[in-house]
Image (cartoon, rainbow, N blue to C red):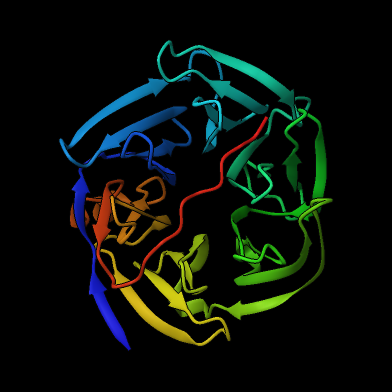
Amino acid sequence: MATVDAVLALDMRADLLEGPVWDSRDACLYVVDIMAGRVHRFDPATNACTTHDAHHTVDSVGAVALSDAGDLILATRDGFARLNPTSGVLTTIADVEKDKPLQRMNDGKCDPAGRFWAGTMALDETPRAGSLYRLDPNGRVHVAVPGATISNGIDWSDDARTMFYIDSPTRRVDVFDFDLESGCASNRRPFVHIPDQDGIPDGLTLDADGFLWVALWRGGAVRRYAPDGTLDAIVRVPTACPTSCAFGGPDLRDLYVTTARIELSERERAGQPLAGGLFVCRPGATGRLPNRFRG
């Protein structure tokens, strides 16, 4: 089994860095610092990082997606919004759980039909308080999976017939049968169980060969699983809390890994000075271009 070490790409010192997505048009990576309400744009060619601070408008940003129109789609505390990366103007698309101030949106991604999926969770992680929502291109919002606790990683197979999804406290990656035309996910079942000692499953991505990459919170690693669920490779990350991963770079062979420091003690932070940074490695696999929102 292959083992690869991720190295620091950018020392960001973020509390909760999440949601990496590669923009091939501009050759840059977008990530979010959830609780700070910030969207960061990283240019690996120059190591430049620019920040859109949405915190004056929204309390948090759980996920970011690209759109066909060239702007960004955000999952914020109160719902879905569009961010103009040039002007910084944030425009609400739809409210989601705005009447629940003790909840927020978390991880999300676009499906192959251009719909944006993102889930909610309680700030105190109350079991089954959240849901996974689907934003259609026409702006309508649907509850896709009710009763989620910490809605996290999501992605779809190349044939769009399978959806992968993580509700972190289950310590599983689940799969659904997926109908691309209707956007309906059904027949939920376990795909991979993560042993307690290996960490908690967080964000995920699929590569071009259909293998699944899962970031393990408190596991200090990203794991690659084969289509039959067997463990295939491990990426070691020099901090305890990897949060998500995505492929990028001109050849889509750079695996970027986001990390967090929000739950680390003072002693842990001293021993993990790079926690909250962005990491990268070349594990030998090729990624896929992310889906874009078509609204």
Residue plotted at (65% across, 42% down): 114
Horizontal and vertical percent position of residue 75:
60, 34
Q: How many marks?
A: 0
Left or right of residue 121: residue 182: right
Q: Is residue 254 depicted above or below 14 in this figure?
A: below
Horizontal and vertical percent position of residue 20:
42, 46
As rendered, which of 171 and 62 lies closer to the eye? 62
The quadrant of the picture occupied by the C terminus is top right
Residue 38 lies in what quarter of the image?
A: top left
Horizontal and vertical percent position of residue 185:
80, 60
Q: Is residue 218 depicted above or below 294 in this figure?
A: below
Left or right of residue 249: residue 31: right
Residue plotted at (58% across, 86% down): 228
As rendered, which of 28 and 149 lies closer to the eye? 28
Residue 88 visible to the viewer: yes
Horizontal and vertical percent position of residue 145:
79, 54
Residue plotted at (72% across, 33% down): 137
Residue 143 lies in what quarter of the image?
A: top right
